Amino acid sequence: MNYFMAILPKMAGFLLLVLIGFTAVKTKVIKKEAMPSISGFLIRFVLPALTISLIYSNQTTFRTLVQYGRIAGTQAVMYLVMAGAGILGSKVCRLKGTTANVYRGCSVGGNFGFLVIPLIMALFAEEGGSLYIPICTVMDTTFVWTVGFALFTNGIAQKENPVKKILLNPIFISVILALCLTSLHITVPAPVMDIIDSVGATSSSWGLIYLGCSLAFMNPRNLLKYKSILLLAATKLFLIPLGVYAVSHLFLTQTESLILMLISAAPSMTTSSMIAGQYHLDEEYASAAVVATTLLCIVIIPVLFLLVSL
């Protein structure tokens, strides 16, 4: 399958949804005060509903998760490589203090819920790509709130337990709940599942609209102040994803390698700015990193698929 030709119309559609969100902000339909509510609804209701819907419809159980041990292990190593690249990059750019913390934290994980999940569903539906979403979600949540969180808050008094962040994460809870339902062969009434499926189906559109809203509230002028973000974008969005595909392709299936490449190429998560603000880090730098990687990924992700299709 020529994934480059397949992804172009998908990325065009995604860009249109991002523009809808951007326009909604510029026309004052959505105000900044509403952003936490939209984000909260997506994270606490929409994405968990999608997760439950995928696990229940595919009847994925704890037992079947063992089948995904290789991709889970490879994904774990991938996050450690991201962390190493973040530490090395901050030293190369001679970043200091909380700016270095933000650079390193932004290198780990990415916008999994709002960008990666919709792309996996759009590109790999026929190959059973949705089967990988639950396990990849668990791995992403775990490493973002352990390794990534540790890099963000290194040397700073931590106010929260990262393990607690994982266990209380709504998406993580939804994964465990859905796996319990399928593993114990508990039947959910059809009307209830219809509602869950309906709510979860809105994730791809609302997730990208939210991204567009977030971009509209960020100051693009900040991008010109931080040349180190170019190195962050180059390593996170291009070099590491290519390396991940080249190595994983040797022992994983084509679909699994492409999914891992896509996960590693995700832009810095939008919550990076929230973490920076909460822990008194360089919030302006975090916002610039999110803006730059989000804008560039729209171009770089199709290029990655072009290169692996050659």
Image: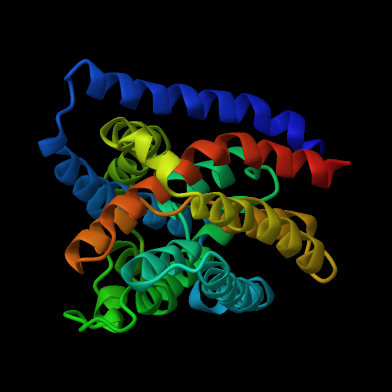
For this rendering, which residue is in front, 282 or 190? 282
Which colour style is shown?
Answer: rainbow
- Give x and y (percent) for residue 229: 50, 52
Identity of the residue drawn at 57% across and 77% down:
80
Q: Residue at x 15, y 44 (%)?
A: 37
Vertical side of 78 occupied by 240: above or below? above
Q: In the orientation shown, which residue stands out farthest toward the left? A: 33
The furthest residue to the right: 310
Image coords of residue 62 (percent x, y):
50, 77
Q: How many marks?
A: 0
Q: Is residue 121 above or below residue 26?
A: below
Q: Quadrant of the C terminus?
A: top right
Relative height, residue 86 to residue 158 (above, below):
above
- In the image, 278 versus 206, the foreground residue is 278
Where is residue 246 drawn, in percent x and y? 81, 62
| Residue 147 on image: x %, y % | 43, 78
Instruction: Report the residue at 50% width, 42% height from top.
Output: 118
Quarter of the image that includes the N terminus:
top right
* x 44%, y 58%: residue: 56
